[in-house]
Image (cartoon, rainbow, N blue to C red):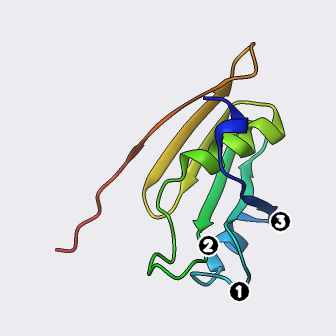
Amino acid sequence: ARPEWAPPRTLRQYATAAEVDALPAPPPGEGWLYAWAWEDEAAGRVRARAFPRRDDGIAEDEATGAAALLLTAELGRALNITQGRGSQLITAPGPDGSIEIGGRVRLLTAH
């Protein structure tokens, strides 16, 4: 995909993954917020959470490909993003300005 295809999102970096984890869902404010922090910058590992902050009953998006795409474009490097409660997004910039994105979601069930 190309970063310019993604709808706009506010990408806000936090100092630690714990700060991202502690955010209320949704945090106060307007418009899409993609909150992220490095878990291991050298390895490209990121902790992120995505908040649409709109009136449709969805407080948090479990896996947001568009936001991962924009973050990868901004940072200019491959990322391994843990988002939400059980999602992993893997991204890699291509030589032509495109970005490859894939991942997986783990379904967590109550026992």
**Could you tell me which quadrant the N terminus lies in?**
top right
Q: Residue furthest left?
A: 111
Crowd rating for badge 3 (residues with CA inside 10 Å; few <14, some 14–19, many 20+): few
Q: How crowded is mark 1: few (under 14 residues within 10 Å), some or many (20 or more)?
A: few
Task: Pick the residue in front: 39 or 52.
Answer: 52
Q: Position of residue 75 (x, y in %)?
A: 82, 39
What residue would you read off at disc 3? 15
Q: Tell me the residue that label 2 is attached to.
A: 21
Q: Where residue 35 appears, x then y in whole percent?
A: 70, 64
Which SS class for mark 1? Answer: loop
Is 4 drawn above or below residue 10 in the view shown?
A: above
Which residue is at a point 49% across and 54% down the rendered structure image?
63
User: Tags 2 and 3 in contact by the CB under 8 Å rule?
Assistant: no
Q: Is residue 66 left or right of 87 when viewed as pictured?
A: right
Q: Position of residue 101 (x, y in %)?
A: 55, 32
- The amino acid on which the numbered mark 1 sits, given as a three-letter code, is Pro
- SS at mark 2 in the image: helix
Estimate the spatial distance between the alpha carbons at disc 3 and disc 1, rounded to whole Å: 19 Å
In the picture, residue 13 is in which quadrant? bottom right
Q: Give the mark nearest the N terminus, 1 or 2.
A: 2
Mark 2 closeness class: few <14, some 14–19, many ≥20 residues within 10 Å: some
Answer with mark 2 or mark 3, whichever residue precedes in sequence.
3
Please, is residue 87 above or below residue 12 in the view? above
Q: Mark 1 points at which residue?
A: 28
Q: Name the residue located 22 percent from the left edge and 74 percent from the top edge.
A: 110
Labels 1, 2: front one: 1
Q: Residue furthest top?
A: 95
Q: Three-letter amino acid code at disc 2?
A: Asp
Q: Residue 72 carries which label?
A: none
The residue lying at 63 percent from left, 45 percent from top is 68
